[in-house]
Image (tube, coloured by chain):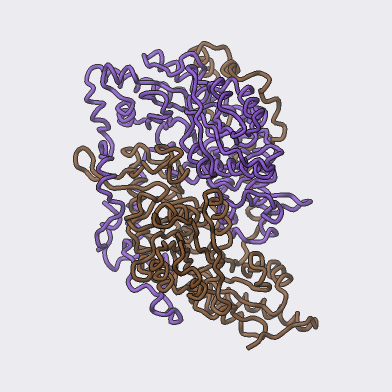
């Protein structure tokens, strides 16, 4: 019996102690007519060797294509030590540190994580994580509505250049709480949010403004101007940031005169593998004045009876197990194991290592864009600086080409038309530090060959405008 | 010592990042960072040693008996982790085309099918990232169902007073008022009170069965009838599914929507507080509202089902597909157990709980519901010890740590004074349970002879009892020093 240690003799002894004759007797409070008749749809059990064989086959079946997709999940080198230590049983198989004295390892680690995140974002406090970047943005918006006591409207300005899945997730989660998400367009040339698009909201009752840096197109926003505009109008600023980029870019705590108020984002780039989209973790930081409105677990440092320093969950009066229907969120667990990985990852890279990663991603993507646009048919869609992703406009149909790339074991990027119908034949490309010059060249070679075939085939190719 | 305090300026684990930082001259200065963040500067070995040592300060299933009630802390098979972390699975981008994801999608599709079968529901979505998100999805689907029928006057969710805190918090997040239903003296929902509470305002009832009191809700059919007759829907909180896996199915009990905690019943790791996974299952009438994405089958091909395929979906709950890697571990676990293994989970979890309950009773501990069978867990109340010996549930819990046992859940459910909610799970051997009984008996003796041993406990851990009041009043949430 897999994972059940009982011998027949022990079962007998235990049943005797209880005073019943069979295990079946222990279920005598369940109405007999409700009892499960059969589970025929569930296959027979397998040995570890058998399931191992199946999983190796399935993992191998999908191949290892060279991936230039980003769009919210980024391939980075992860030091071997990160998951070696993270999957130690003492981290892997522990639970939420309710018994602080028996959980000092996890608790101190979270305190170190919180410290690292406040330093990366230049904010005062951090929580112990949320489910992922998208649900984290939803929680940040709910938090802003609680925190901005001067605003009564529940209106939140949401640029359409924020990750489309984040916007959808946010809508799902805040829909029933009298909050309205007001869309802000992106500039046709720059791909960013312009002061002109904000002008019509001047002086209105708005609760919060969401600023993604970089935005979904990889484009860098004018964060100082946006932040100051919001604060002049009594609007809280919610920053959505990529943690890798913060090694290079101005941290949200320093945006404008007084900095962003709430910062959230996807923590995956910090030591978490792509793994089909999860488990990842969302992070959240804020100004200290709003900490009591923050959702999720928070760890604090305190003293024990002998005056020794120790760590414990704190501000639990915000949470569902105490406040029930009046809690800041229904959130219960965080993503502890991923935070463990991220904390080890950040320790191994340090500020300098992270900066090298960020700068290499940036340089690789620029080089890729240079290579892919050295023809008459592809050009960057927007003219502003970007971090490690860039939207490319193709003057030929993309659909056939992306399939062709896939057969060459290369994923060329994310087709923006899926979420932005107006961006037909646009590809969002990303080249992290994991890509070599040879990888970038290979991509360009495939592209050039396909362009050649397209032109030879006499299809209506329109050269790009200067 | 904090990792920051071990830092030395200029030290680095240079094997782990590109050697140089190319100049990013195209990014204007006002968008650039002006000073590096104060992260630790340590060698690779220092980091390895630091975090290995931290891990050794934890209790965990791999090192200790962990009878934390309502959390199902059973053995997390190592094979599930190893196989879910095969390089091909880790490298797969969530937005990669279906053509290069058939292996992964096949696992997800089969997991959906297995969960449907074992719960008796008609359709399953795997996307909620945790139990609380599954609850949110479930109640949001109840709302979508009523709204689609133009039945929007239903503004109330009923929740038994024994429920987890997430239940009322979830109902509020979905825009509902919460009405609590009392529990009778035998631990069942007060059926008469329920019948008086239901009405045209009732959107649904959220119920955990077995309940958080460690007993099976015997009148579940009558409860389902009362709620359904009033036009409400029945929500099953799967927190305690381990107790009935393969024995009785929520779908057969009349539930319209359920969530499952795969980190409990399907033994995925708790990870020091997550990640979990909280798939939802529904009856036919709620199928259109399931959260996306899901996995479908088109001929021999596995495909994603998104908003385009499910126009009435309650929506998306995370950027991609929830905690995919956790789902893989649950899938592998389900295949290891198979049909028979799944039924044995409930059998041996129940055997262990009833045995432990009986033995503790013999040692002089009072049970909250002495006339009921234990399910996979049960409640001991230390009200008497607290009153006569000044030994509280918290004192027993802390002293257990000294004996090498993680404490049971304390002070939950709130209905039972000075309670310990004890869940041994099916993966513990008899000698481990006997050891726990002996430790409890010894602590009871200590409480009688010298209660201070309990009051001062724990004595043997890295820290003694921590000052929670100070932690909340003098907030210290991040280290303020400068790295060396």
* For residue A31, side relative to residue B9 (left or right): right
Chain A is which colour? brown
Above/below status of B262 relative to B361: below
Q: Residue B277's image quarter?
A: top right
Q: Is residue A368 above or below residue A230?
A: below
Vertical relation: A8 (above or below) B106: above
- Provide residue B22's location: percent of width, then percent of height: 43, 78
Instruction: Tell which of A402 and A63 is nearer to you.
Output: A402
Residue at figure coordinates x 34%, y 58% from the top left: A287
x%, y% of residue B319? 56, 56
Task: Compare residues A419 and A146 and report the one nearer the observer.
Answer: A146
Residue lying at 54% horizontally and 78% vertically, measured from the top left: A190
Residue at the spot x=42%, y=37% of the render?
A321
> Which residue appears farthest toward the left when viewing the image?
A306
Q: Residue furthest bottom?
A: A466
Residue B65, image x, y percentages? 41, 31
Q: Viewed as shown, does residue B203 lie left or right of B299?
A: left
Image x and y of residue B252, in percent: 67, 28
Q: Is residue B340 visible?
A: no
Q: Is residue A157 visible?
A: yes
Count of number-bearing discs: 0
Quadrant where the N terminus of chain A is found in the figure: top right
Residue B88 left/right relative to B477 = right
Q: Nearer the viewer, residue A346 or A114?
A: A114
Q: Colour of chain B?
A: purple
Quadrant including the C terminus of chain A: bottom right
Question: Picture quarter containing residue B463?
Answer: top left
């Amino acid at each position: 019996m897999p994972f059940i240690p009982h011998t027949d003799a022990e079962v007998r002894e235990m049943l005797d102690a209880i005073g019943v004759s069979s295990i079946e007797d222990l279920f005598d409070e369940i109405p007999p007519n409700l009892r499960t008749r059969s589970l025929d749809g569930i296959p027979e059990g397998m040995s570890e060797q058998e399931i191992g064989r199946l999983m190796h086959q399935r993992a191998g079946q999908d191949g290892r294509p060279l991936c230039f997709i980003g769009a919210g999940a980024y391939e980075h080198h992860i030091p071997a030590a990160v998951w070696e230590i993270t999957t130690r049983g003492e981290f892997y198989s522990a639970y939420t540190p309710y018994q602080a004295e028996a959980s000092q390892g996890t608790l101190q680690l979270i305190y170190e994580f919180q410290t690292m995140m406040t330093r990366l974002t230049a904010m005062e406090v951090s929580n112990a994580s949320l489910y992922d970047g998208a649900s984290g943005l939803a929680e940040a918006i709910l938090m802003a509505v609680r925190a901005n006591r001067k605003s009564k409207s529940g209106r939140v300005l949401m640029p359409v250049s924020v990750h489309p899945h984040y916007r959808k997730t946010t809508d799902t989660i805040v829909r029933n709480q009298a909050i309205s998400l007001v869309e802000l367009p992106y500039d046709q040339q720059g791909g960013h949010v312009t002061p002109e698009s904000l002008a019509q909201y001047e002086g209105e009752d708005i609760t919060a403004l969401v600023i993604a840096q970089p935005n979904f197109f990889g484009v860098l926003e004018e964060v100082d101007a946006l932040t100051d505009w919001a604060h002049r109008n009594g609007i809280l600023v919610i920053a959505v940031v990529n943690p890798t980029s913060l090694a290079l870019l101005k941290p949200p705590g320093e945006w404008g005169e007084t900095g962003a108020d709430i910062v959230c984002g996807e923590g995956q780039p910090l030591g978490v593998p792509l793994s089909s989209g999860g488990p990842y973790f969302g992070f959240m930081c804020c100004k200290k004045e709003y900490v009591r409105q923050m959702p999720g677990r928070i760890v604090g440092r305190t003293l024990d009876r002998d005056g020794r320093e120790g760590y414990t969950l704190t501000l639990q009066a915000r949470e569902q197990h105490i406040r029930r229907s009046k809690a800041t969120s229904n959130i219960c667990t965080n993503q502890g194991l991923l935070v463990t990985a991220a904390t080890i990852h950040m320790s191994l890279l340090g500020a300098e290592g992270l900066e090298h990663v960020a700068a290499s991603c940036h340089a690789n993507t620029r080089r890729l864009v240079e290579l892919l646009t050295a023809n008459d048919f592809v050009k960057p869609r927007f003219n502003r600086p970007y971090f490690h992703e860039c939207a490319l406009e193709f003057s030929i149909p993309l659909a056939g080409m992306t399939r062709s790339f896939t057969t060459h074991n290369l994923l060329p990027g994310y087709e923006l038309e899926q979420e932005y119908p107006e961006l037909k034949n646009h590809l969002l490309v990303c080249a992290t530090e994991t890509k070599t010059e040879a990888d970038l060249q290979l991509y360009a070679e495939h592209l050039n060959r396909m362009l050649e075939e397209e032109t030879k085939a006499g299809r209506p190719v329109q050269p790009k405008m200067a | 010592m904090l990792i920051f305090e071990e830092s030395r300026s200029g030290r680095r684990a240079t094997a782990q990042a590109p050697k140089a930082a190319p100049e990013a001259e195209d990014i204007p200065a006002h968008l650039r960072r002006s000073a590096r963040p104060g992260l630790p500067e340590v060698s690779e070995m220092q980091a390895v040693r630091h975090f290995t040592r931290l891990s050794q300060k934890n209790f965990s299933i791999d090192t200790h008996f962990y009878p934390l009630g309502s959390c199902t802390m059973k053995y997390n098979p190592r094979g599930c982790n190893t196989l879910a972390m095969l390089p091909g699975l880790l490298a797969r981008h969530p937005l990669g085309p279906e053509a290069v994801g058939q292996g992964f999608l096949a696992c997800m599709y089969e997991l959906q099918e297995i969960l449907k079968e074992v719960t008796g529901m008609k359709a399953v979505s795997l996307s909620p990232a945790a139990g609380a998100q599954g609850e949110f999805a479930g109640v949001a689907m109840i709302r979508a169902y009523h709204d689609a029928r133009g039945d929007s006057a239903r503004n109330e969710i009923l929740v038994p007073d024994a429920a987890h805190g997430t239940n009322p918090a979830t109902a509020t997040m979905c825009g509902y008022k919460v009405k609590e239903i009392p529990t009778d003296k035998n631990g069942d929902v007060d059926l008469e009170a329920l019948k008086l509470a239901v009405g045209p305002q009732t959107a649904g009832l959220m119920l955990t069965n077995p309940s958080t009191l460690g007993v099976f809700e015997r009148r579940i059919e009558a409860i389902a009838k009362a709620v359904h007759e009033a036009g409400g829907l029945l929500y099953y909180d799967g927190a305690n599914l381990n107790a009935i896996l393969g024995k009785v199915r929520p779908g057969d009990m009349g539930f319209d929507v359920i969530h499952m905690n795969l980190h409990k019943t399907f033994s995925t790791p708790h990870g020091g507080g997550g990640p979990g996974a909280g798939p939802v299952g529904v009856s036919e009438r709620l199928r259109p509202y399931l959260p996306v994405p899901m996995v479908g089958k088109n001929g021999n091909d596995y495909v994603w089902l998104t908003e385009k395929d499910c126009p009435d979906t309650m929506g998306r709950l995370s950027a991609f597909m929830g905690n995919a890697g956790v789902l893989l571990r649950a899938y592998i676990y389900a295949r290891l157990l198979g049909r028979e293994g799944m039924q044995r989970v409930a059998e041996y979890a129940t055997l262990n709980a009833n045995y432990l309950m009986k033995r503790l009773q013999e040692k002089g501990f009072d049970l909250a519901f002495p006339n009921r069978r234990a399910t996979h867990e049960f409640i001991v109340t230390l009200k008497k010890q607290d009153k006569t010996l000044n030994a509280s549930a918290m004192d027993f819990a802390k002293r257990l740590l000294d004996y090498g046992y993680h404490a049971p859940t304390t002070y939950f459910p709130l209905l039972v004074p000075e309670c310990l909610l004890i869940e041994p799970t099916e993966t513990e051997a008899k000698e481990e349970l006997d050891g726990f009984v002996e430790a409890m008996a010894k602590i009871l003796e200590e409480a009688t002879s010298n209660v201070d041993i309990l009051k001062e406990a724990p004595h043997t851990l890295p820290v003694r009892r921590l000052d929670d009041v100070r932690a909340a009043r003098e907030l210290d949430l991040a280290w303020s020093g400068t790295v060396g």
